[in-house]
Image (cartoon, helix red, strand yellow):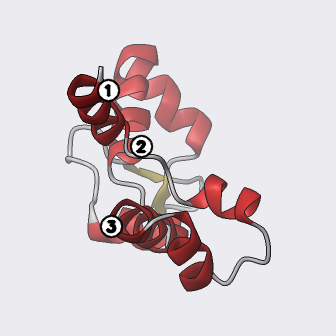
């Protein structure tokens, strides 16, 4: 999945890995060590941040759907949709809506 994200969201040219000529005259991507050294720690941190902001994993769909169902229909419905035998597992996948909890606290005191 990481490779797909890297292809879909390539680094800006100034942060991207450079091509270097090896001893036989062929161009190849610089090693990660060379790349990191060329950029320096501050620019390398930009690479890490860029990747983190654009990383995605298919399990996020399941997590989002579980949270959505829990918000709209409750924990039991989310448990059924996600196919969990125990609600404890569903509570890990389907987050509680804290905004809703705050609203209820305001309304009920």
Q: Residues within 10 Å of mark 3 (few under 14, many from 20)?
A: few
Does the CB distance between marks 3 and 1 fall below 8 Å? no
* As drawn, 1 above or below 98: below
Residue ID for mark 2: 52
Q: CA distance from mark 2 to mark 3?
A: 30 Å
* Residue drawn at point x = 36 percent, y = 36 percent: 101
The mark nearer the N terminus, 2 or 1, is: 2
Choose mark 2 or mark 1, whichever is in front.
Answer: 1
Q: Position of residue 25 (x, y in %)?
A: 49, 61
Q: Position of residue 63 (x, y in %)?
A: 50, 65
Q: Residue at x 53, y 73 (%)?
A: 78
Judged left or right of residue 42, residue 90 is right
- Residue at 44% x, 35% y: name it: 48
Q: Nearer the viewer, residue 62 or 23?
A: 62
Q: Which residue is mark 1?
A: 105
In the rendered structure, which disc, 2 or 3, sits on the residue that comes first in sequence? 2
Image side of residue 14 versus residue 77, left or right: left
Left or right of 33 in this view: 65:
left
| Sequence order check, earlier mark of 3 and 1 | 3
Question: Crowdedness of circle 2 by 10 Å Cα count: few (<14), some, many (20+)?
Answer: few
Q: Quadrant of the C terminus?
A: top left
Distance of mark 2 from mark 1, alpha carbons? 35 Å
Quarter assignment of residue 86: bottom right
Instruction: Please give the residue where the numbered disc 3 appears in the rendered image.
Output: 72
């Amino acid at each position: 999945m990481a490779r797909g994200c890297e292809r879909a969201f390539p680094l800006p040219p100034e942060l991207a890995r450079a091509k270097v000529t090896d001893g036989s005259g062929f161009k190849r991507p610089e090693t990660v060590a060379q790349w990191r050294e060329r950029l320096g720690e501050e620019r390398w941190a930009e690479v890490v941040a860029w990747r983190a902001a654009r990383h995605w994993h298919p399990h996020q769909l399941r997590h989002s759907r579980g949270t959505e169902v829990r918000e709209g229909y409750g924990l039991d419905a989310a448990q059924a949709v996600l196919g969990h035998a125990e609600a404890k597992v569903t509570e890990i996948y389907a987050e509680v809506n804290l905004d809703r909890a705050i609203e209820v606290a305001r309304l009920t005191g």
